[in-house]
Amino acid sequence: MARNSQFSESADSGGGTGSWLLGLFVGVLGGAAVALLVAPQSGSEVRGVIQKTAQDLPSKLSEVIEDSLDLYASALNYCQLVIEEQTMRVKRAVAAGKLAAAKKREELELGGTSVLPFQHR
């Protein structure tokens, strides 16, 4: 029972892309704030750095998003291949089981009284 409550708590906690993007945004803002507080530069130099960073931010953000989407697509393709492979393994196992059941059914329908010399029981 404790395991089920742990699962429901982790399922309710959320996660996902929205939380990741929010964390990224908060991290960028926090990093910028710390950089401003500890910067040994004059105000005009800091403003220049902020402008440059603000201009570079959209391209960097789009690069991070593009890389994240590529990683997501790769993971999705991998999962799809694994599922297809496992599906084929299950289908082969089911086919082997059906074949074995058909052989046993045939053996039982024949009554099993006629034993050939080369058959072992």
Image (cartoon, rainbow, N blue to C red):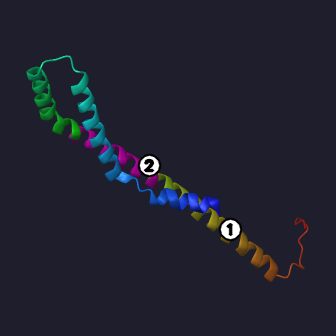
Q: CA distance from mark 2 to mark 1?
A: 29 Å
Is residue 16 part of the magenta span, yes or no? Answer: no
Q: How many marks?
A: 2
Residue 80 has which mark?
none
**What range of the chain is rendered magenta?**
62-80
Front residue of 41 and 95: 41
Residue 90 location, x and y as percent? 59, 62
Q: Residues within 10 Å of mark 1 (few under 14, many from 20)?
A: few
Q: Quadrant of the N terminus?
A: bottom right
Say what secondary structure mark 2 lies in: helix
Q: Residues within 10 Å of mark 2 (few under 14, many from 20)?
A: few
Residue 119 location, x and y as percent? 87, 66
Is residue 77 part of the magenta span, yes or no? Answer: yes
Residue 78 has which mark?
2
Quarter of the rendering containing residue 95: bottom right
Left of 73 or right of it: where is 93? right
Can you name the residue that lies furthest to the top here? 40
- Relative to 96, residue 61 above or below: above
Q: Nearer the viewer, mark 2 or mark 1?
A: 2
> What residue sits 12% from the left and 18% below the top?
42
Residue 97 has which mark?
1
Name the main secondary structure of what is drawn in magenta.
Answer: helix
Residue type, mark 2 in image: Tyr
Comes first in the chain, label 2 or label 1: 2
Residue 49 location, x and y as percent? 14, 25
Say what secondary structure mark 1 lies in: helix
Residue type, mark 1 in image: Gly
